[in-house]
Image: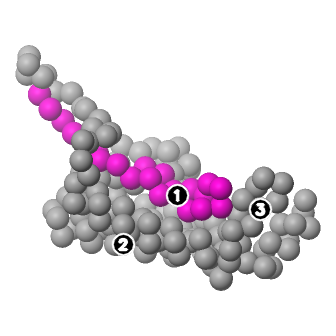
Amino acid sequence: MTYDEYVAYIRDRFADLFDPSYTDQDWQYLITINRGWWPLFSDFAEQMEGVLRHHNEFGRWYIRQVKEKFGELRIYFRPAPYERLDVDGFSEWVDDIDPPEPTPVEEMIGIIKEQIGGRANRTCGECGVHGELRVIDGWYRTCCDRHFAAWRASK
């Protein structure tokens, strides 16, 4: 499966986990991980979908970005903007970025994210076999011995 095919699969299979206002251009930068972590992110999305279904929260939480940073899998999610009526009766969209206390759904998704991140810390981002965090000249990657050797040879 190519990267574009994987993103299309995620976009179709887990459409309810992403903001419907995302454009094709947004989707080009939404998921920027290599194939070794695709199964981990798919697992995260499936578990998040289950939590949202159980709590009847579809459309209230969205995945905002999936990327590698400092050799770690980063998955960002947040509450969806919600509509409220102002005093004049006009609607406006409000982003509730930092609710005062985490909701049970937010806590559950956070636990899933932490577990998936822990698995990614032991999984080569390139091929999905056992890997570990490696550093070359201040650049971080979680990779297997083979991909570390190839990375080191390219420097």
The residue nearer to you, when weighing 18 against 56, is 56
Q: Answer with left or right where residue 53 lies relative to residue 36.
A: left
Magenta span of residues: 64-85
Image quadrant where residue 107 sits: bottom left
Q: Which residue is mark 3?
A: 135
Q: Residue furthest top?
A: 88
Amino acid marked by disc 1: Arg
**Residue 15 x, y percent position in the rendering:** 35, 60
Image quadrant where residue 155 sits: bottom right
Q: Which residue is mark 1?
A: 74
In space, the residues marked 2 and 3 are separated at their CA atoms by 31 Å
Amino acid marked by disc 2: Glu
Q: Is residue 134 visible?
A: yes
In space, the residues marked 1 and 3 are separated at their CA atoms by 18 Å
Badge 2 or badge 3: first in the primary sequence: 2
Amino acid marked by disc 3: Val
Categorize mark 1 by other alpha carbons within 10 Å: few (<14), some (14-19), many (20+).
some
**Callout 2–callout 3 Cβ contact below 8 Å:** no
**Residue 5 x, y percent position in the rendering:** 55, 67
Eye-nearest disc, 2 or 3: 3
**Residue 16 x, y percent position in the rendering:** 30, 59
Q: What element does badge 2 sit on?
A: helix
The residue nearer to you, when weighing 88 against 113, is 113
Categorize mark 3 by other alpha carbons within 10 Å: few (<14), some (14-19), many (20+).
some
Question: Is residue 101 highlighted in magenta?
Answer: no
Eye-nearest disc, 1 or 3: 3
Q: Which residue is mark 2?
A: 46
| Residue at position x 53%, y 75% in the image | 119
